[in-house]
Amino acid sequence: MPVDHSGPDTVTVVPAPHAARRPVTVTHHGHTRTDDYEWLRAKEDPEVRAYLEAENEHTQERTAHLADLRQQIFDEIKSRTLETDLSVPTRVRGYWYYGRSFEGKQYGASCRVAVTDPDSPDSWVPPRPAEAARPDEPALPGEEVLLDLDVLAGEHEFFSLGGSSVSPDDRLLAYATDVVGDERYTVRVKDLTTGDLLPDELTGVLGGVTWGGTPDHFYYSTIDETWRPDKVWRHRLGTDQADDELVHHEPDGRYWLGAGRTRSRRYILLAASSKNTSEYHVLDAHDPTAKPFCFAPREEGIEYSLDHAVLAGEDRFLVLHNGNGPEFELATAPPRSTPRAAWVPLLAHSDEVRLEDVEAFATHLVVSQRSGGLPRVRILELGPDGVSDDWIVEFPGDLATSGVGGNPSFEQPTVRVGMTSMIQPSSVYDLDLRTRTKTLLKQAPVLGGYDPTAYEEHRMWATAPDGVRVPISLVVRSDARGADGTDPVPLLLYGYGAYEASMDPYFSAARLSLLDRGAAFAIAHVRGGGELGRHWYDDGKLTRKPHTFSDFIACAQHLAASGWTTPGQIIAEGASAGGLLMGAVANQAPEAFGGIVAGVPFVDTLTSMLDATLPLTVTEYDEWGNPEADPAAYELIASYAPYENVADLPYPPILAETSLNDTRVLYVEPAKWVARLRATAPAADVLLRTEMAAGHGGVSGRYRAWHDRAFTLAWILDRMGLAERGISGSVGTPSTDAG
């Protein structure tokens, strides 16, 4: 029975909620499974709601002793943040666009000002807004407030802006909002000259909209009953949504369909993509009656993307594809239906460099690529005969993460790039292609005297059971390991490992609340991610998915064996597919961890992948396998699915966090998991926390998000034995009596 730590002189037993067992038996491929807790899926059932609320109350009772620490961490995060702030302006046609945040407000505002001298050579240098401007003052002369997000949010517990887009004549703004958390958006259109809303209102939209080449129509996607975007529509302003024209429908349940516009504003691209196959249809952006043509029909296993460029005076499509190797190559093709055999290589495939994206501009191409485990930005300068030069944008530091920022204008002579590391706050630069000089426009402010030299970051390598070397990125205070720098310290180990998503080194102001109390933070770059290229992803999916779990365990063991920490001091954390990772390693190596945080965890993997009516299941077959049709896939998923493999093991303390309105990973997965853990391993210390008005990304609003993270960090520090420790000095954080 868990023990409440509510006071130093008393020990009070706090009974956990009990989920009734209501067995449901199912059989697949000769295997019979009994599920006692499937009844928790009935989201609207008052009994289910009551159970989730009881779990929340239990979690609050069990963590009541951390209330002061939670408040202190929240205050630390808040005190490090410049609350009234603004982003670096980005130019689109004749306006500079930027966002503002205000002290005391959750969401902020989006704004713009006119470019004062559009034809000047310096017209691409962003203006320097008045950072000290009060909320009731313009940050720049002539400022227009396009959207006040706090006004839009109103009294809603949850609010998300799905996307906003200005019409080609700069007069109208289409924006999408979600006030539930289920990522089903409502689109409205605002007249920026009058401030009035047009009568147009579209519901059930995924994300935002894409304007055509004229301001009288735009394109948007809707979802099917499994939450898959399967249709793209053309909406004419002033008409009812019921009269919108269906432009393209994707019937294959493995494919997501979306619309976008090339930076050149010449074409609308309709992208149908599964996990391993792509197909693009193309429309003339300036023809509101255009019918799409297929650029190249899908071939199983062939992925490609398109952009439009002008090379040596000719219109060309840029085609980034894996037809000649897994790490992709860049080719060109005429802007019409073109078979793969006719694509002309521009950057040939290399086993050492993963090409991830390409963006076209009037005078240059920008390639996002990856080598040595880190992302890099590559510039291809264009001349009269094509590519005239080819170079990499360099940043100092072994763990520097660089990437392309917002660059919406085809004609711009600069490239907006960003850089961060585990000790370097996010920094925004403009790269002038004429001189190849980088100008620092803004570094995310960290108040309270943050000194990056007081911290150190490291890259190290663990060895997986099959001999593969797995990278780890680590950050720690320079004084945390004692006078000789060898003392083990508590450590938070983060992992994900799916969908080729790369968890690159990054800075976090909230993380300082851990580091300044003497803990270290590390990222295990396990297989299933994309850190080391496409092969790294392929080696951690489908039949090779178990590599993700053994890699993470190997990283934890390496950190302990090399003296950085001890097994009891390692807290593991992951979310979504990373939550599956947490559940799997809890079953496979519970002794390796002192605690586990599983956020929106995909822990009932087998049940979800057996139900094709659930959101995402069919589109996920190429990631996990199809256990309904394939007995081998069934047995593999059943061998690692966390819910299926719960046993009476010495689990470390576990905190599971979820959201009631999550569409991507349903709340029922962690709810069932926690119920089975309690019933099967009665000694397990397991907590479930459900946000009752949020979605996959958790709560909305920055202050609510800070409180949410403070809750998790306080639990982690408690597991580390650091809950009573004050923060070190004044480096990076306020004094120890903050908050």
Image (cartoon, rainbow, N blue to C red):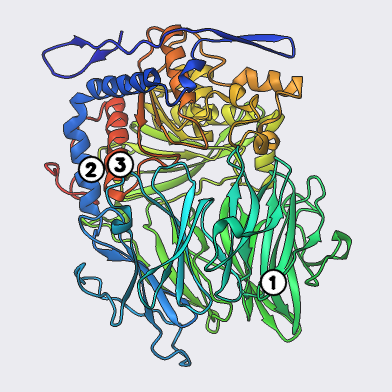
- Residue type (three-letter) at the residue carrying disc 3: Leu
- Residue type (three-letter) at the residue carrying disc 2: Phe
Say which residue label 3 marks.
515
- Residue type (three-letter) at the residue carrying disc 1: His
Select label 2 or label 3 by which is in front.
Answer: 2
Mark closer to the chain start, 2 or 3: 2
- Is residue 244 in view? yes
Q: Is residue 104 left or right of residue 56?
A: left
Say which residue label 1 marks.
308
Q: Position of residue 374 (x, y in %)?
A: 56, 53
- Distance of label 2 from label 1 (alpha carbons): 46 Å
Closer-to-camera residue (543/556)? 543
When the figure is inspected, residue 505 is found, relative to residue 270, above or below; the finding is above
Q: Position of residue 472 (x, y in %)?
A: 50, 40
When the figure is inspected, residue 583 is found, relative to residue 541, above or below; the finding is above
Would you identify the image quadrant in which residue 241 lies?
bottom right
Q: Is residue 76 left or right of residue 613?
A: left
Quadrant of the image containing the N terminus? top left
Quadrant of the image containing the C terminus? top left
Q: Secondary structure at mark 2?
A: helix
Say which residue label 2 marks.
74
- Distance of label 2 from label 3 (alpha carbons): 15 Å
- Is residue 352 in view? no
Q: Position of residue 702 (x, y in %)?
A: 30, 50
Write the residue at 78% across / 72% down: 335
